[in-house]
Amino acid sequence: AEYMGDCVIVTMLSATLLCVLLSVVTGAPAHVRIVNGTDTKPGQFPFQISLQYDGSHVCGGTIVSGSWILTAAHCVAEEIAADFTVLAGTNVLSKEGERRQVLQYVIHPGYDPENNYENDIAVLELLSPLSMTGAMAGVTLPSQSQVTEGGVTSTVIGWGYLFTEGPTSDTLQMVNVITYSDEECQEVLPGYVTATNICAGVPDGGKGHCSGDSGGPLIVKEYQAGIVSWSVKPCAQPPYPGVYTEVAHYVDWIR
């Protein structure tokens, strides 16, 4: 089977033709990876998983509980659940952790790929639960009122491309970025983001997520503030921040 995850969309921003890159790796889709990051340490992010299609990494995700994973809707939409597996308990893809088959996925009912990937969020149920021992732990979710302000240092992690159409990393990468206020994000990406998104990047560009990072977390103060959704291609291109689904708006739905 061929993974058809996401397609690249071409949009007009500031009269410049740019490609919107949805965070995927390999094949037809465009999933996002960390640009100019550093290697993580074993067990540093025990909630991070690799979502794999036919044994190849396509997206990130986070452990909500032993049986449930949080990711982006565009990572799984219109695919067969049984074609996906989750690799947990390792920060190196070539080192086996625990592997579980996906039983089913539930996409947010308001997910709309035709409208700037609004409500780009999904949960996956595993066929059998993770052991939740060793280098595995559930992610801390925000409260419903815990909306992240602009100007906050945050961390995005993933196994995606190191740069646009570049190689992927065997070792989980991390990079620090700064959150944007809703007003700042609308100013840079007018009409492309909603109140349920959060944006993060660095003003000079060069750091952020890229293909293969989709579905992974944006971490702020030990909780998951966002889910990697999309970015402007080339990856980490100034002045465009990465766009994330803001988790605080969905905690009741997740639970």
Image (cartoon, rainbow, N blue to C red):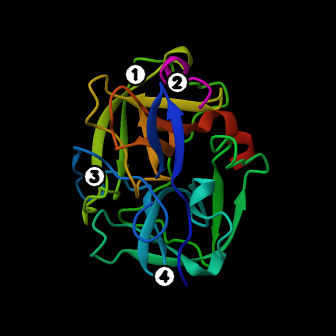
The amino acid type of the residue labelled 2 equals: Thr
Q: Which mark is residue 152?
A: 1
Q: Residues within 10 Å of mark 2 (few under 14, many from 20)?
A: many
Res 140 visible = no
On screen, residue 77 versus residue 41, left or right, reads: right
Q: Which residue is mark 3?
A: 173
- Of residues 233 and 150, the one drawn nearer to the viewer in this rendering: 233
Residue found 54% across the figure and 39% down from its top? 11
Q: Earlier in the sequence, mark 4 or mark 1?
A: 4
Q: Secondary structure at mark 3?
A: strand
Q: Secondary structure at mark 2?
A: loop
Q: Which residue is mark 4?
A: 54
Mark 2–mark 4 distance (CA, rounded to whole Å): 36 Å
Quarter of the picture containing the N terminus is: bottom right
Above or below, comparing residue 228 to residue 129 in the picture: above
Above or below, comparing residue 140 to residue 147 in the picture: below
Residue found 50% across the figure and 57% down from its top? 61
Image location (x, y in percent) of residue 105: 68, 66
Magenta region: which residues? 185-192
Q: Which mark is residue 148?
A: 2
Q: Residues within 10 Å of mark 1 (few under 14, many from 20)?
A: some
Residue found 53% across the figure and 74% down from its top? 3
Q: Secondary structure at mark 4?
A: loop
Dots 1, 2 in contact, CB < 8 A: yes
The quadrant holding residue 248 is top right
Q: Earlier in the sequence, mark 1 or mark 3?
A: 1
Dots 2, 4 in contact, CB < 8 A: no
